[in-house]
Amino acid sequence: MITKESEKKFKAGFVAVLGRPNTGKSTLMNALVGEKVSIISPIPQTTRHQIRGILNLEGAQIVFVDTPGMHSFKDHLAEHLNVISKRSIEGSDIIVYVVDVSRRIGKEESRLMDIISTQNIPVIMVLNKIDLKSVYLNSYIEAWQKKADEKVGKKPSAQFIPVSAKTGKNIDELRAALLENLPQSGPFYDTDTLTDFPIQFRIADIVREKLFLALDRELPHSVAVEVSAIKDRKKVVHIEVTIYVQRNSQKKIVIGKQGRGLKAIGTLARSEIEKIYDKKVYLEIWVKVLSDWQHRPRILKELGYWWV
Ligand SMILES: Nc1nc2c(ncn2[C@@H]2O[C@H](COP(=O)(O)OP(=O)(O)OP(=O)(O)O)[C@@H](O)[C@H]2O)c(=O)[nH]1
Ligand SMILES: [Mg+2]
């Protein structure tokens, strides 16, 4: 039982995980939480929601907020991704700013640093992917310091922690640094909660991840997934899923020859969803053409892209 004394010492807070697309934000959050909450793929703009992953420790609760990678506007979906990323800063106690040290620092990074360095909360710059050639590691640190030097008045400070979200290197050190910066507070969620991401969106995302992994580089951005029904019965969960594409030709690609593509996606998704429910899952997947869905705010809303 929690005594009054230990309640007083309890630490809890929100950590916004921000960065450009594909830097490894979702991989990092999953590694920190120790479970797969967010989907991951080698294609930029995988994450389309604000997804909270909750790490419950003795005496502390860290609520991570994974966000879509921030980038230049292209369409309504891209704009939405930026909005929800920025919004996740509000109410956060710490920013984890993820950069990819194997990739050259680009123009967009400077804009992102402008946003992050003007928030009055602790920033931890996570220099991710050190298992690859870390040729650009110093250029990220130098760019941040240059930004800090340009500021008049209080300099934005940051801690720099090199990690590999993929291999787990320095993840314990990062967790310790986060705990140090966490304010004293009671927990925000029940201490056995892993995520508050609604199950229908979590399932839709799992299907989308399998699509991303199966499809050509360009196609994934034309795909959206909707879970229209979940019937959780005694021994089996029956789930109805619709995959939306923009053109008929894309529908053919998703379905594949004699339905083989769709079958493979379904098999992979099903085994992952079964782990969540711990029972048998039956997936019924439809593929429909819904032209230009990315530019139609009403449809985006229906697909859950305004869920934050
Ligand atoms: N080698 C290596 N690859 C990594 C590491 N972390 C992530 N990746 C890979 O980088 C790619 C992108 O990872 P994600 O976690 O989806 O990146 P993200 O920042 O969430 O991407 P968006 O949601 O699109 O913004 C995937 O192929 C990951 O396997 C790492 O530490 N090392
Ligand atoms: Mg992501």
Image (cartoon, helix red, strand yellow):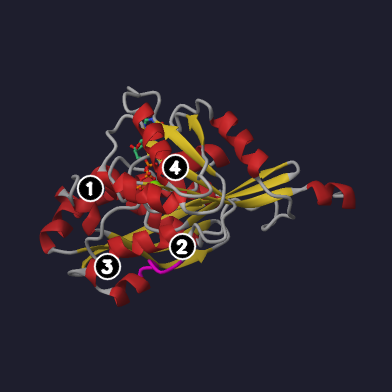
Q: In which quarter of the image is ligand 1?
A: top left
Let me know if residue 304 is in the magenta part: yes
Amino acid found under the numbered disc labelled 3: His
Q: Relative to 247, say whether 128 is above or below.
A: above
Left or right, 128 with reference to 170: left
The residue beneath circle 4 is 148
Residue located farthest toward the bottom when viewing the structure as drawn? 298
Q: What element carries label 4?
A: helix
Q: What residue type is labelled 4?
A: Ala
* Upstream in sequence: badge 4 or badge 3: 3
Residue type at numbered disc 2: Arg
User: From which residue to which does the magenta span run?
Assistant: 303-307
Task: Give the number of callouts.
Answer: 4
192 and 18: which is toward the camera: 18
Between label 1 and label 2, give the one nearer the viewer: 2
Give the distance between the C-alpha atoms of the residues marked 4 and 3, in whole angstroms. Answer: 33 Å
Q: Which of marks 2 and 4 is in front?
A: 4
Q: Where is residue 78 in the image (x, y as percent from the top left)?
A: 29, 60
Identify the residue at image location x=53%, y=48%: 154
Q: Distance between the residues labelled 1 and 4?
A: 50 Å
Give the labeled residue for mark 1: 261
Residue 90 versus residue 181 in the image, above or below = below
Q: Compute the Cα span from label 2 to label 4.
A: 23 Å
Q: Is residue 150 left or right of residue 186?
A: left
In three-dimensional space, the C-alpha distance between marks 2 and 3, rounded to whole angstroms, equals 16 Å
- Res 103 quadrant in image: top left
Q: Which mark is residue 87?
A: 2
Give residue 99's position: percent from left, percent from top.
39, 38
Identify the residue under disc 3: 76
Q: Do the residues labelled 1 and 3 touch (CB within 8 Å)?
A: no
